[in-house]
Amino acid sequence: MATSGNSQFNPEVVISHKFPESLYTYTERDAALYALGVGACAKDAIDDKELKYVYHQDGQEFIQVLPTFSTLFSHGLTSELGQIPDLQFDPRLLLHGQQYIEIYKPLPSHGCILNKASISGLHDKGKATVLEVEIVSYEKESGDALCMNRLAIYLRGAGGFSKSSQPYSYSSNPNNQSAFPKIPKSQPFAVFEECTHASQALLYRLSGDYNPLHSDPLFAEVAGFSRPILHGLCTLGFAVRAIIKCIAGGDQNMIKSISGRFLLHVYPGETLITEMWLAGLRVIYQVKVKERNRAVLSGFVDLDRFSSSL
């Protein structure tokens, strides 16, 4: 573990680390499977706002892709963290704390994606280290930038490396992307309630996140949960779908950026209530679990324009 007594730990080495470029190839089947994994058409198999994510009139080509599908592009990143010099941590104590996404152009229904990752933040929290990794994804054939994902990863037990009384903190992120708005006390502009299925995590994991915490009862018990929990990025997918449906009039291409902070776990089968407030072109949102009346996710979504349906 990186500690204050570990003179080998050099934060400058960590933030200058160069990740190898990586490729992510996907088909329309992958995009459709992801959409089903985050609840598309679960309530209504002929939903006119969501059928386009899983079916096209010819049954095969040109389905639409949810913006949160872009989170899959960096699935192999966790294994790369172990290659960062001096950064020692227990992968079992890793927590995904926040996700920020920018969409530059609509995601294609299939393609080969080139990912370029870099360290954009490093913060000593005493008992933990917060590492921020930014991944810019390009369409390999055209070279066009499609999107950017930034993850804030909490490495518990790996903090205390600062060499002075002032905790070490580095960030190259714009402040307006890192700050989280307060949840308004006023009534939400829109509320969307949706029940996850008992098998939701088993379906979502087929998109590539095979962490046994989401499928193995014994593993979940050791981690302190009564049963396997839902992936945080699955909950984020549910929330953004709700915003597209309720605020964007079903037009996923209105989404410009997405920010989410993971607050608490969700058990598959629980009911998610997404509350939404408008602040100009920004939608502030909060997701609660109905059965426990606890907030599990909050953040904002920026739109590029207003929907004509509002």
Image (tube, grey):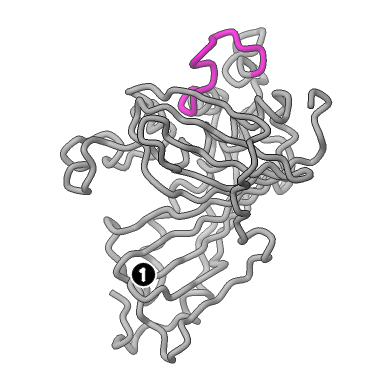
> Residue 203: which quarter of the image?
top left
Q: Which residue is mark 1?
A: 128
Quick one: quadrant of the C terminus? top right
> Residue 66: which quarter of the image?
top right
* Mark 1 surroundings within 10 Å by alpha-carbon count, few (fewer than 14), some (14 through 19), many (20 or more): many
172 with respect to 269 (left or right): right
Q: Residue furthest bottom?
A: 164
Q: Which segment did they paint magenta?
A: 36-49
Where does residue 40 sit, x and y in percent of width and height? 54, 21
Instruction: Decide whether residue 292 is among the magenta residues.
Output: no
Q: Nearer the viewer, residue 138 or 49?
A: 49
Instruction: Decide whether residue 45 is among the magenta residues.
Output: yes
> Residue 52: which quarter of the image?
top right
Q: Looking at numbered disc 1 in the image, what kind of residue is underneath it?
A: Ala
Q: How many marks?
A: 1
Where does residue 254 sit, x and y in percent of width and height? 75, 35
Give me the residue at 55% from left, 27% from top: 31
Give me the residue at 49% from left, 16% from top: 42
